Image (cartoon, rainbow, N blue to C red):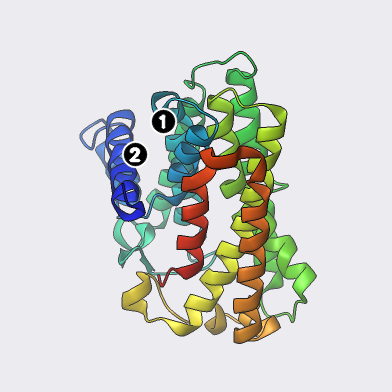
Amino acid sequence: MSLKIWLKAQQETVDTALDQILPSEDTRPATIHQAMRYSMFAGGKRLRPILCLAAAEACSGEEKNALFPACAVEVMHTYSLVHDDLPCMDDDSLRRGRPTSHVVYGEGIAVLAGDALLTEAFAIIAQTPATKRYNARDYVLELSETGGSKKLIGGQVLDLEGEGKELDQEQLVHIHEAKTAALLCSSLRLGGMSANCTAEELQALADFGYNLGLAFQVIDDILDVTQTTKQLGKTAGKDESVDKSTYPAVLGLEESKVEAARLTALALNALKPLGENAARLEQIAHYMLEREF
């Protein structure tokens, strides 16, 4: 099966699971559940849950056991987007090609929708079947550490504090290893854990995820200055307009492309302990390096 067909199939699998797990639109109070679903089903690529499923496959696990963590990381990711887009944060009016949550539902409901999604993520992750090595406590701790003040939230704090300042590459890495790489890394780790992976396999997935996450951010920054709003599905040139440091701003466009390739090579090298089982993860890494949106 080609990567394109496989990605589409995995995306549909995740969407079906999310639709079944999340409260329906008519669950009272309807407004909050409509707002949650508006952002959840806005047409995202589902990269993080797909990485989770691919990691489980790489560790000889079953898809059905990886679906709970896959959905949990996507719900957490979507909460972070809803909050990042708020006027008090990145103040963006477009996400995934349509108006952001606060534009449609108002700022108050958008805040609450994000809160509800974050809470839902932990309810979902706790349902992941236990293995010989990992149980609900391990899954919840993994996700909570990733979403907490030292990583996901901490990265957003550093991002906000860095606006209007000339940051160097080291400072930029600190922001994005917390804000972007952490959740990608956790998606892979949780997939491996659901497959009862060994400590060596877990470390390989973590190293892959760290470098892939940073490469993803470098590419994202490049696309922000080379693609249009229509191509991206979000406001192009947004980072420059709010005086935010990016890889092209710090390294230059061509050097940023070199850095993305370097990080991708490190990610691919990290997969060696997983052997042929990591074929899908390798394909995804190449796909991400070459993406145009």
How many residues crowd around disc 1 within 10 Å: few (fewer than 14), some, or many (20 or more)? many
- Label 1 SS: helix
- Whether pointer 2 and pointer 1 mark residues with C-beta atoms closer than 8 Å, the reply is yes
Label 2 vs label 1: CA separation?
A: 7 Å
Q: Name the residue carrying label 1.
A: 67
Pinpoint residue 209: horizontal percent, then vertical percent. Answer: 62, 49
Which residue reaches farthest front? 276
The residue that appears at 69% across and 62% down in the rendered structure is 175
Picture residue at 54% right of the left edge, 70% below the top: 219
Residue ID for mark 2 = 14
Does dot 2 land on a helix, a strand or a loop? helix
Number of other residues with Cα within 10 Å of mark 2, as a class: few under 14, some 14 to 19, many 20 or more: many
Image: 166 above or below 78: below
Amino acid type assigned to the residue bearing label 2 in the image: Val
The x, y position of residue 149, in whole percent, is 70, 46
Using the rendered image of the protein, determine whether residue 238 is visible from the camera's viewpoint: no
Quarter of the figure that contains the C terminus: bottom left
Seen from the viewer's position, the closer of residues 11 and 195 is 195
